[in-house]
Image (cartoon, helix red, strand yellow):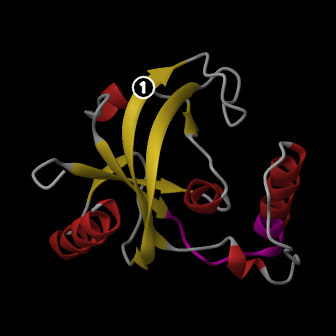
Amino acid sequence: MTRTEIRGLTLRHPWAWAFQTAGKDVENRTWHPSRQGGSVGMFLALHGGSDKINSDYANEIMDALVWMEWQGCNLPSIHPNSLSAVVHSGIIAVAQLVDVRRDSPSPWAAQNQYHWCLKVTPLPEAVPHRGAQGLWTLEPEALARVRELYQAVSA
């Protein structure tokens, strides 16, 4: 991975946490990664979006956590007024895009979406970075730190 390009992908909460902690292996998107220069085999820096949570967003996060429980995910005990356990801003994992399909058997796959099937490696700490829509380029300092952390946990 040392010389391989890594593109950023920002996720809403709690989906970034689900990749990092709950075994999520599919990212659902309405668009194919090739639309923005992506391809199977590429690496993604999974980025948790802003940690600014209003009450509507908090309700959305809680609804997603209830859905995860129904799917059999082992979740921490989370109180609606304390979502810090599942809200992590910054780059929290590196994932290799191993397949893109419309019919993934994963319980994380949503209907009528492209299923980006990922092999995820959580990072031991979040790397600060501003997110963006679509696939984006990491700042050099953040890229160096992501590579360093990834190599440490992959060794």
Q: Which residues are magenta?
A: 48-58
Horizontal side, residue 94 vs residue 49: left or right: left
For this orientation, the residue located farthest to the top is 103
Magenta span has 11?
no
Residue position for label 1: 99
Question: Is residue 32 visible in the rendered structure shown here?
Answer: no
Category of crowding for the residue at label 1, using alpha-carbon neighbours closer than 10 angstroms: few (below 14), some (14–19), many (at least 20): some
Q: Secondary structure at mark 1?
A: strand
Horizontal side, residue 81 vs residue 83: left or right: right
> x%, y% of residue 36?
31, 34
Horizontal side, residue 112 vs residue 7: left or right: right
Q: Is residue 111 above or below residue 139?
A: above
| Residue located at (85% from left, 64% from top) | 59
For this orientation, the residue located farthest to the left is 3
> x%, y% of residue 138?
25, 62
**Foreground: 79 or 31?**
79
Quarter the C terminus occupies: bottom left
Question: Is residue 111 visible in the rendered structure shown here?
Answer: yes
User: Which three-letter amino acid code belongs to the residue tagged 1?
Assistant: Asp
| Residue located at (49% from left, 32% from top) | 116
> x%, y% of residue 11?
54, 55
**Foreground: 77 or 35?**
77
| Residue located at (60% from left, 58% from top) | 12
